[in-house]
Image (cartoon, rainbow, N blue to C red):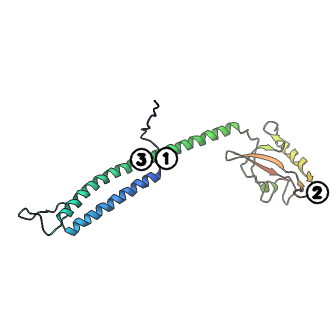
Amino acid sequence: MKMTEENNDGNSTITMEDVQSLIKKKDTIEEQIKAYYDVLEDQEVGMEGPLVDAEGFPRADVNVYQIRTARHTISCLQNDHKAIMVEIEEALHRLHALEKAKREQDQAESQTESMEQEVTLPSPFARVDAVSQGSPACQAGLRISDEIIAFGSINTGNFQNLQNIASVVQHSEGVFVFYCAKLPNHWRGNVPLNVTVIRNGQKTQMGLTPQRWSGRGLLG
């Protein structure tokens, strides 16, 4: 015999659509209650007005059966209304709890990813303090506060001082790759240096082409 365990977890998944469905049921019940109250108002008796005359006979000026039916139905609907309000309150509580748990999980995962990335990213050996507008560095996408972890052939492992970067830049000036212009998809131009930086905790790569421009130096 094969048996399956039932899931009686009170914290089962609930969605906003579920809550909206309960609210719709509540609105329907309220509309029904109002409709039956309108019946009582038309008869001018309400929920407590007498249905017999002074001699104890059913009143002839009202529809006794209709009034009793309306009163009974209103009582039942009011009980249903109380029950649905409890369901809505519990559903909202569960929904908020699930959303809170989801936010906490997302934050924990984000922190974990950030910590893992901090562990795997190499230490920067230089920091960008200024970028001139229109310069090769600006065109490449370098930004102030970028932390450099690779600049051409220079990386954290072989970096000694800023003269290393200056040497790479000087040797890169005027280096061209030339292809026949008559052939499609071929081009000519300076060879860009592969530059990798840490920006806002993320690794960002770009191509930087050292060249002369209107400002000082080959990078700006």
Residue type, mark 3 in image:
His
Q: Position of residue 144 (x, y in %)?
A: 72, 51
Residue 154 visible to an observer of this rendering:
yes
**View extreme (top): residue:** 1
> Circle 2 sits on which residue?
180
Residue 174 visible to an observer of this rendering:
no
Q: Quadrant of residue 125?
A: top right
**Which residue is pictured at 7% across the width and 62% down the height?**
56
- Quadrant of the snapshot with the N terminus: top left
> Circle 1 sits on which residue?
99
Residue type, mark 2 in image:
Cys
Q: Earlier in the sequence, mark 1 or mark 2?
A: 1
Q: Position of residue 25 (x, y in %)?
A: 37, 56
> Circle 3 sits on which residue?
93
Q: Position of residue 206 (x, y in %)?
A: 78, 50
Q: Earlier in the sequence, mark 3 or mark 1?
A: 3
**Which residue is pictured at 91% across the width and 52% down the height?**
177
Q: Could you say which is closer to the camera, residue 69 or residue 204?
A: 69
Assign a secondary structure to mark 1: helix
Q: CA distance from mark 2 to mark 3?
A: 70 Å
Q: CA distance from mark 1 to mark 2?
A: 60 Å
**View extreme (front): residue:** 1
Q: Earlier in the sequence, mark 2 or mark 3?
A: 3
